[in-house]
Amino acid sequence: MSDATLVLESVSMINQEALPPGVLTYRRESKVDTLTSETEIDHLLPVRETEIECKANNALSFKSGAAAALRRLLSPALRRSTLLLWFVYFANSFAYYGVVLLTSQLSDSNRNCPSGLTTVQRQEDANLYRDTFVTSLAEIPGLIVSAILVEWIGRKATMWSMLFTCAAFLGPLVLHQDELLTTALLFGARACAMGSSTVLCLYAPEVYPTSVRSTGVGIATSIGKIGGVICPLVAVGMLRTCHQMEAVFVFELVLCLAGVACILFPVETKGREID
């Protein structure tokens, strides 16, 4: 009881609200066994059956609750937001992990595949580690820019603008570029991919009402991870077979479609109260 009281007092202080008047009490619900003449074995049998029955009821309740939440996500009021969120989560994960993989795979492609450059120098491993480190730092400005834009132009505009900008950074990579330009383009692309992913994680919970918020965001996140699983087939598989133009075009297409999906989101949650 004392631990529970401390937790409530902490919540009260953080929210700067007074606790309701009264005393915290705990009432244990228990079944009174009126048949005192039962043996211990006879007494344990119905308890065991009750536990099994409770577990079955809980499992049934869980299944029915999950089905009801899924039906609510695909109801006419939420269907458009749900389907668009699923695709944008998929595209963001696909693009983000793809940009990460492109950092090393483009160097291998320039090294092993014929290009339009007059001279192609073999990149040392040290340069690859440096390029990976530099592009990883891009996530810091990406987070800063998204934090500024999200309260200035709104969630939707921030996401689609960063997705289209990411596609613009990747555009020149359809052709072989020198190492410095490739690193600079991947730096910008990764910053935008990180920014859009961050805003998406902020936007999704604001779309759903409390009754289906966890289920909606959880399913969307799971679908997004599928994009992370598939992207190596493009970022690694196609580049290793010297199909750089086709690989980058796939990323461009997915990013542009995700940007259009963000524009089509039915609601802007900036300044909107959560249901």
Image: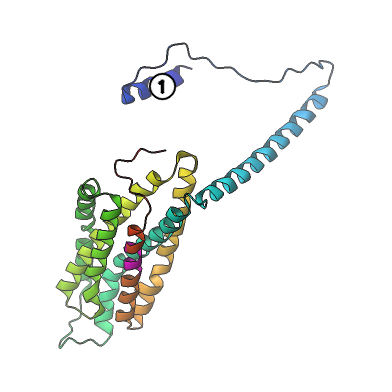
Look at 27% across and 75% down and name the residue there.
Answer: 106
Q: Quadrant of residue 10?
A: top left
Number of other residues with Cα within 10 Å of mark 1, as a class: few under 14, some 14 to 19, many 20 or more: some
Foreground of the two, 18 or 72? 72
Asked if 253 appears above or below 82 in the picture, the reply is below
The secondary structure making up most of the magenta span is helix
From the image, which quarter does the C terminus lie in? top left
Residue 39 in the image, given as x and y percentages of width and height: 83, 21
Residue 230 in the image, given as x and y percentages of width and height: 43, 68
In the figure, is residue 171 to the left or right of 62?
A: left
Q: Amino acid at mark 1?
A: Leu
Q: Quadrant of residue 157?
A: bottom left
Residue 151 in the image, given as x and y percentages of width and height: 23, 45
In the figure, is residue 268 to the left or right of 175?
A: right
The verdict on residue 212 being magenta is no
Asked if 232 appears above or below 39 in the picture, the reply is below
Foreground of the two, 91 or 116? 91
Q: Is residue 221 visible?
A: no
Look at 52% across and 14% down and name the residue there.
Answer: 25
In the image, the segment drawn in magenta is 254-259
Q: Is residue 266 visible?
A: yes
How many numbered marks appear? 1
Residue 72 in the image, given as x and y percentages of width and height: 53, 47
Query: Which residue is tagged 1?
Result: 8
Asked if 202 appears above or below 29 in the picture, the reply is below
